[in-house]
Amino acid sequence: MAAFINLELYDNSDFDRGAPRWKRILWVLVRCVFFQNPCPWGSAFRSALLRAFGAKIGKGVCFGSNVNISFPWRLAVGDHVWIGDDVGVLSLAQVTIESNVCVARRCFLCTGSHDFRREDFKLKVAPILIRRGSWITIGSLIMPGVTIGEGAVVSSGSVVLKDVPANCLVRGNPAAVVCEILRSPECAKASVAVSRAGVPDKSLSLSADAAAGLDR
Ligand SMILES: CC(C)(COP(=O)(O)OP(=O)(O)OC[C@H]1O[C@@H](n2cnc3c(N)ncnc32)[C@H](O)[C@@H]1OP(=O)(O)O)[C@@H](O)C(=O)NCCC(=O)NCCS
């Protein structure tokens, strides 16, 4: 019989943390004082702290309280990005957030997992990319290896396991495309008309509900 998880065998000594031990310890202290607590420390000040620890942070980036970033040296954030209260960024692999992205409260960007088929519960990591002008709404979970396309919206409480095409609204667990977001000068409103052109292989495709809506 195949053995199940045996945590005694867990060994992540080959995992590259990307920074020396002293830097990781110092970051934990800085994180506790200036990030993971309810004090409203200024965002410009916290951006500067993150840069000092190797993050690339653009201008006009706003941080809420109790933001938990594991490795700032694996974080790149563009200009005018909002990162809400209680957001978690498990940046074991690179996390890139392009400009004009809103990551709402209680979202979690998760770059790490484990191979549960292996007895040694091997760590696996993969990067996350959130393209410009997208909105990750409240309480959503973005899983390892996922790219959120530009202008996309992830509905509250979604669990995103696959790439989200640009300008699409997704929702649910696992997240599925609800519709394309059509933005016009008069009215930026969502439509059930979905263009599937240019959708990468790994991307989410139209949900059964949305497809049924299109047939009507
Ligand atoms: C994605 C979102 C913007 C959609 O808003 P909307 O276009 O106004 O949509 P509506 O609220 O009118 O809902 C439309 C339908 O989607 C459903 N729906 C909305 N959000 C949903 C979600 N997160 N999961 C599942 N279904 C959802 C509604 O029940 C409704 O279904 P119905 O047509 O069967 O009645 C909104 O649901 C959301 O997630 N807001 C984010 C809030 C947030 O993050 N706040 C923090 C501020 S930064």
Image (cartoon, rainbow, N blue to C red):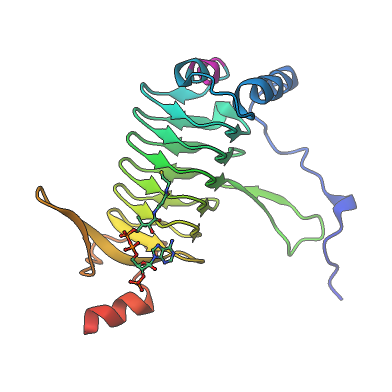
Q: Is residue 156 left or right of residue 152?
A: right
Residue 183 is inside the magenta segment: no
Tell me what residue is drawn at x 47 percent, y 52 percent.
146
Ligand 1, by image quadrant, is bottom left
Q: Position of residue 38 (x, y in %)?
A: 61, 29
**Bounds of the magenta segment:** 48-52
Residue positioned most to the left: 186
Q: Position of residue 48 (x, y in %)?
A: 49, 15
Question: Does 121 appear above or below 128?
Answer: below
Residue 50 is inside the magenta segment: yes
- Can the viewer see residue 81? yes
The quarter holding residue 180 reads: bottom left
Question: Does 122 appear above or below 2?
Answer: above
Tell me what residue is drawn at x 58 percent, y 46 percent.
111
Q: Nearer the viewer, residue 73 or 60?
A: 60
Tell me what residue is drawn at x 43 percent, y 30 percent.
77
